[in-house]
Amino acid sequence: MIVAKFGGTSLADGARFRHVAEIIRADPNRRYVVVSAPGKRCDSDIKVTDLLYRFQQSGNQADFAPIEARFREIVEDLGISLDLSQDFAEMKQLPHNADYLASCGEYLSARIMAAFLDWPFVDAEECVFFDEQGNLDEVKTRHALFEKLRRLPHAVLPGYYGVMPDGQIHTFSRGGSDISGALVASAMDAQVYENWTDVDGMLVTDPRIVPQAAPLRAITYKELRELAYRGATVLHEDSVLPVRRSGIPIHILNTFRPQAPGSWIVPRGEKPDGPITGIAGRKNYTAIQIERENTNSMVGYVRRILSCLEHWNVPFEHLATGLGSVCLVVPTDAMEDCREQLKEDITLAVHPDSILMEDHLAMIAVVGRGMTGRPGVCARLFSALGGSGISVRVIDQGAGEMNVIVGVAEPDFEPAIRAIHREFFE
Ligand code: ASP
């Protein structure tokens, strides 16, 4: 059994609804479908969710007109007899809470798709639950989804929203229909969670840096986490957790090229041909360099430094130590309000000979389960960087051998990613 989620671009107009319905019908295992609100039809278009937020903010009835027109057009184009006048009348009746209005795009999308497929519509309001603080109540949600859906051979559900204990509609953060889809897949113990979008899958690296970056075939959840943490994006981050926990693979597919193989995100992957699965990175890190003679015999030296970071709530991401030197890599933003105090505290705590904060560092993660036990990967990586005249400022590799992190100066960030891509993928 497959749970399929379709993104907004896949549902931008009547023709695309029809195309999505064809995809759904092409495999009888696709039994539960989660939809987003209609997205952009072309680059200059506005997503329905954005139109809804605009209407909420302006309170101007004229701003509801394009929303109503979008949905009326889709219904007409599909040739279904679905009267949404009542719904439009209620939506137009301001004031509403912002989340309620934002949820209307998904609600209407799902009503239309259900009518077109002649499948039951199941409202997320009845089976996706948040607590008073607005956090997802996953246990209650899974139970409710299962109880509702197990009696139905098919269903269409709206993504993006659920309900609070007081009955108010509440939405996930933007792009949250991915989470709704993952919750349905996990509650129904699907064999696959299909996530239909407008790209061929997850690319090996950022196409803005390497335009020819190819989609990757299979990536494990562990690898995905490493890459996502370093800035790779395709799915909403929180959407991975429910399916990952249930051991369900995610298949990312392109609605506009359904024959393309797409990308698989799997609990465990076979050993791939190449050592590297993907490359991702982020800028805006600071290296804190602390020097002091003879620290190798001082027990507790690093702990005292780390306590200062903890005190100022600064997370550190990498730590390299040598005889007499400690280098910590931290996100620059995290020190925005406490840079000088942190420096002072470290000075008081360990009396260093010098302490230097160097900004404008970029950290790049080179990730691949195929690296494990394969000699020579680092040699290739560093000669690729050296050959491009890039100086490596920080190196980090754990014994897990699945991830090598290199820190370079920010201006070297894009050239470094291009050099690594050339070495391993071209
Ligand atoms: N429609 C919502 C958004 O634009 C949620 C989604 O599409 O996943 O963010």
Image: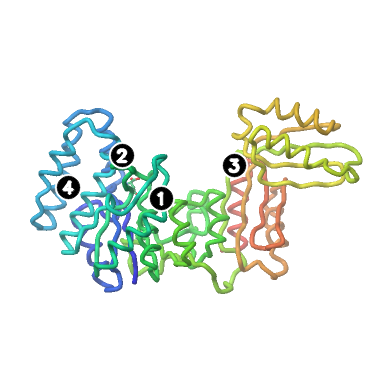
Question: Which residue is under mark 2?
Answer: 99
Closer to the chain start, of discs 1 and 2, is 2
Q: Earlier in the sequence, mark 4 or mark 1?
A: 4
Distance between the alpha carbons at the discs numbered 1 and 2: 17 Å
Q: CA distance from mark 4 to mark 1?
A: 31 Å
Camera-nearest label, 1 or 3 = 1
The image shows residue 350, relative to residue 78, as above or below, that is: above
Callout 1, which amino acid? Asp
C-alpha distance separating marks 1 and 3: 35 Å
Quick one: label 1 or label 3, which is nearer the N terminus?
A: 1
Which labelled disc corresponds to residue 284?
none
Q: Secondary structure under badge 3?
A: strand
Classify mark 3: residues with Cα within 10 Å, few (<14), some (14-19) or many (20+): many
- Label 4 belongs to which residue? 71
Residue 122 in picture, x, y percent from top left: 24, 57
Q: Earlier in the sequence, mark 4 or mark 3?
A: 4
Nearer the observer, disc 2 or disc 3? 2
Q: Is mark 3 within 8 Å of ligand 1?
A: no
Q: Earlier in the sequence, mark 2 or mark 3?
A: 2
Q: Position of residue 161 (x, y in %)?
A: 32, 47
- Which numbered circle lies on residue 283? 3
Give residue 137's mark: 1
Report the Cα–Cα distance between label 2 and label 3. 33 Å
- Closest to the camera, between mark 4 and mark 1, is 1
